[in-house]
Image: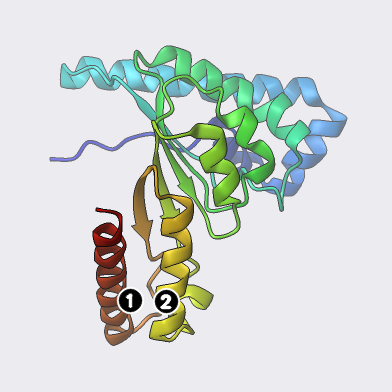
Amino acid sequence: MFFERWDRSPWGTAVHLRGLINLFKDTIRNPDFVHKLLNFITESRIRWEKNKSKYLGVRTEKGSLYNDEVDAQLISPKIYQVFAHPYEVKLANFYPQGIFYFHSCGNITPFIDTIASIRGLRKLQISPVTDFKKAVNQFGGNFVFEKRMHPVSDMLLADEKTIQLKIKEVLKIGRKIALELDPGPITNISIDKLRTWINVARKTIKSELLARA
């Protein structure tokens, strides 16, 4: 039996409560309100975790942050640092082992240095628009990177040669790290195309591993 989790970040929850445009306006016109809202959301998640632990009789040791709303195409590094990050840190300080996983389908390249300071962080999603090389240089080898491929250019419209080259490029950057290769959202991709990608990925990864042995 799976008990529902609260993984959405405080900033992401605030976006869904206020709406993106309204929240942006709030950061300029009424920043104190934004901080009160984010603190309320954070305290609510902490209280929810405590009640869940009491109900299940099992303590949650580490948390996750699903943070698609943290995206350089939507917010600036300053907004992230002032409004989003402090409440992620507060959550990390609540969990005994901190925040284990940070997820964003957006571009987190300008935020990587700040994200790296979150206590306990060990796994990071790298979207197709995030600078993978910068993330690897920042976090080093004690990390697991969930590298998501672009579902259109790297899969849907890619022939076998292109798929192979894209995967080799990722493996070259991530040769000294723990890496999970994610084909991305596959809702509109045919089974045959998916099989092709999986087969090429397996062959390419096997070939690269043998070459390094």
Q: x, y (%) of residue 78?
A: 77, 32
Q: Amino acid at mark 1?
A: Trp
Closer-to-camera residue (30/102): 102
Closer-to-camera residue (55/167): 167
Q: x, y (%) of residue 163?
A: 42, 76
Q: Quadrant of the N terminus?
A: top left
What colour scheme has been applied to the protein in the rendered image?
rainbow
Is the C-beta separation of discs 2 and 1 under 8 Å? yes
Q: Most extreme residue toward the left, as rendered?
A: 1
Q: Amino acid at mark 2?
A: Ile
Q: How many marks?
A: 2
Q: Kindly identify which residue carries mark 1.
A: 197
Residue 213 vs 156, above or below: the answer is above
Left/right placement of residue 8 relative to residue 84 reads: left
Closer-to-camera residue (96/133): 133
Which residue sits at x=47%, y=21%? Answer: 44
Res 16 visible: no
Residue 7: which quarter of the image?
A: top left
The Cα atoms of the two marked residues, 2 and 1, are separated by 7 Å
Q: x, y (%) of residue 152?
A: 50, 76
Q: Kindly identify which residue carries mark 2.
A: 163
Which residue sits at x=33%, y=23%? Answer: 62
| Closer to viewer: mark 2 or mark 1 | 2
Q: Dot 2 surroundings within 10 Å: few (below 14), some, or many (20 or more)?
A: many
Left/right placement of residue 61 relative to residue 136 reads: left
Left/right placement of residue 25 relative to residue 196 reads: right
Which residue sits at x=31%, y=62%? Answer: 208
Residue 180 vs 84, above or below: the answer is below
| SS at circle 2 | helix
